DNA sequence: ACGACTATTCTAGTATCATCGAAATATTAC
DNA sequence: GTAATATTTCGATGATACTAGAATAGTCGT
């Protein structure tokens, strides 16, 4: 049961879904039922359902039925795994010395010019 | 210059791009030029260029030109910010007691059944 | 200036995704 | 069983994303 990190990032990579996820993080282990979520993150039920499905299939959420309601809650285990994946792939290697002290940036040759304006958020009008 | 976390997750939410990002994490602050990346993550130049653009526009990478080569490297500042966003939205609140021991919010009734098989990775064939 | 090299942009085809109303399913209450 | 409530699934549409070959642009060596 290998987690698909790309799918998990992808699930969080949509504003609506990220908001839902954040809401459920704040909601705690009990989670919220769909109707409660819908009240807080207004969107049509079918749209919400699709987003919940995406988040659940990527295992960032889990669903639990309680009488008429279905409660969605953060799947802490897999969420923690995702965080670990991200931090260990970055911080860890960094602390391991690959990104050694001080010189974090610019070690190559002097910059000259750039693609177009790739590192700025600027629009491209030509 | 507010970072768009959803866009950053989205950038990592594609297998090819995630692989490129991980490669560059391992490459350290110096980064790698496009040709080196292409050699390690085989894909057509135009495809690679688009992925690098997506990652750069979301500010997970930065680009720096050195003579004929353009070196892409992890934008540590923004990457760290993303990690912090994820951890603080989850772990932090959790440790802060929101997810405190035991019940946090109105306990529901005993579970009965579920949507279809949303929390399992199972295929849906019908 | 020319040619080789590096990388991006153009253009286009295909595929996947987001959205949402309507219909269907599941559960409880009467 | 019927009604009421909660949520999902269907179906359709428009938008966006991925992919990649071909054309273009920046840089260096001669």
Image: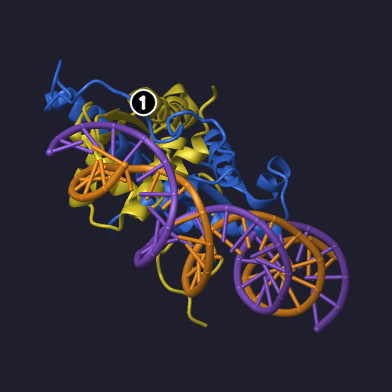
Chain colours: A yellow, B blue, C purple, D orange
Q: Quadrant of the C terminus of chain B?
A: top right
Residue B3 occupies quadrant: bottom left
Across and down, in percent, residue B45 comes to: 70, 57
Relative to A58, does residue A97 appear above or below in the rendering?
A: above
- Asked if residue A1 lies left or right of residue A81, the reply is right
Residue B113 occupies quadrant: top left
Kindly tell me whether residue A111 is visible in this rendering. no
Q: Residues within 10 Å of mark 1 (few under 14, many from 20)?
A: some
Residue lying at 68% horizontally and 45% vertically, measured from the top left: B36
Of B47 and A41, the residue lying toward us = A41
Residue at image mark 1: A80
Of B12 and B38, the residue lying toward us = B12
- Asked if residue A4 lies left or right of residue B99, the reply is right
Residue lying at 72% horizontally and 50% vertically, measured from the top left: B43
Relative to B35, does residue A83 appear above or below in the rendering?
A: above
Kindly tell me whether residue A39 is visible in this rendering. yes
- Asked if residue B27 lies left or right of residue B79, the reply is right
Of B114 and A48, the residue lying toward us = B114
Relative to B108, does residue B24 appear above or below in the rendering?
A: below
Label 1 resides on the chain identified as: A
Across and down, in percent, residue A50 comes to: 41, 49
Relative to A88, does residue B6 appear above or below in the rendering?
A: below
Residue lying at 19% horizontally and 44% vertically, measured from the top left: A36
Residue lying at 20% horizontally and 30% vertically, measured from the top left: A28
Across and down, in percent, residue D2 comes to: 26, 48
Q: Quadrant of the N terminus of chain B?
A: bottom left
């Amino acid at each position: 049961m290998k987690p698909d990190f790309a799918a998990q990032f992808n699930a969080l990579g949509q504003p609506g879904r990220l908001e839902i996820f954040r809401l459920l993080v704040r909601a705690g282990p009990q989670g919220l039922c769909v109707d409660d979520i819908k009240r807080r993150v207004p969107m049509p039920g079918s749209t919400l359902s699709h987003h919940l499905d995406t988040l659940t299939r990527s295992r960032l959420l889990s669903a639990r039925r309680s009488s008429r309601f279905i409660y969605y809650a953060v799947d802490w285990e897999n969420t923690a795994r995702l965080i670990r994946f991200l931090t260990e792939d970055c911080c860890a290697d960094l602390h391991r010395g690959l990104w050694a002290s001080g010189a974090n940036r610019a070690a190559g040759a002097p910059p000259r010019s750039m693609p177009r304006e790739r590192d700025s958020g600027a629009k491209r009008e030509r």
